Image: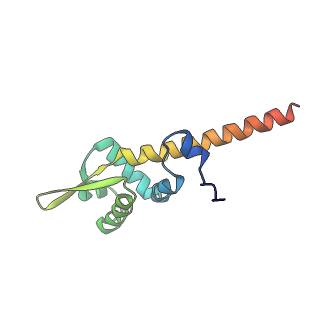
Amino acid sequence: MSPRPSVSPVNSARKTPPLRNSAPIFAALGDETRLRIIAILCAGGTVSITQLTAGTDISRQAVTKHLHVLADAGLVRDIKVGRERLWEFEARRLEEARHSLDAIARQWDLALEKLRLVVER
């Protein structure tokens, strides 16, 4: 007899990306500076590193490293305009992470409902 394929109830119920696909997003957002960068990009659209560092004590090199972490997670992308790189937010990847969190919430809701039914017997 061949082994049964492993099917995650979370991923089979809806076309939810596997949780492991969202892990880099959560890791990238686990830093306060990167969260601040995402907030600026969400509010201000496309911005340069110079604009991101204006009024802060964070160096351009540090912001560049944070932007590369965010880019590796698919949360931002850069656009070369002349000699300058502009950065913008990629909402699609954050939406994927939200779907993963929704899937986890559904699992908890089901588990808590099963527990409630057992307790009420």
Q: Quadrant of residue 69?
A: bottom left
Task: Judge left or right: residue 82 versus residue 109.
Answer: left
Classify residue 48 by image quadrant.
Answer: bottom left
Q: Say whether residue 41 is left or right of residue 110.
A: left
In the depicted view, which residue is nearer to us: 72 or 39?
Answer: 72
The quarter of the picture where the N terminus appears is bottom right
Residue 26 in view: no
Q: Give the residue drawn at x 72%, y 41%.
A: 111
- Say which of 79 and 22 sits in front: 22
Question: In the image, what residue occupies the spot 59% across and 50% down?
Answer: 7
| Residue 38 percent location from the top left of the image | 38, 50
Q: Residue at x 41, y 52 (%)?
A: 36
| Residue 13, quarter of picture | top right
* Quadrant containing the C terminus in the rendered view: top right
Q: Residue furthest top?
A: 120
Q: Is residue 10 above or below residue 50?
A: above
Residue 119 picture location, percent across and down: 86, 35
Relative to the observer, which residue lies in front, 55 or 98? 98
The percent coordinates of residue 45 (x first, y second) are 27, 44
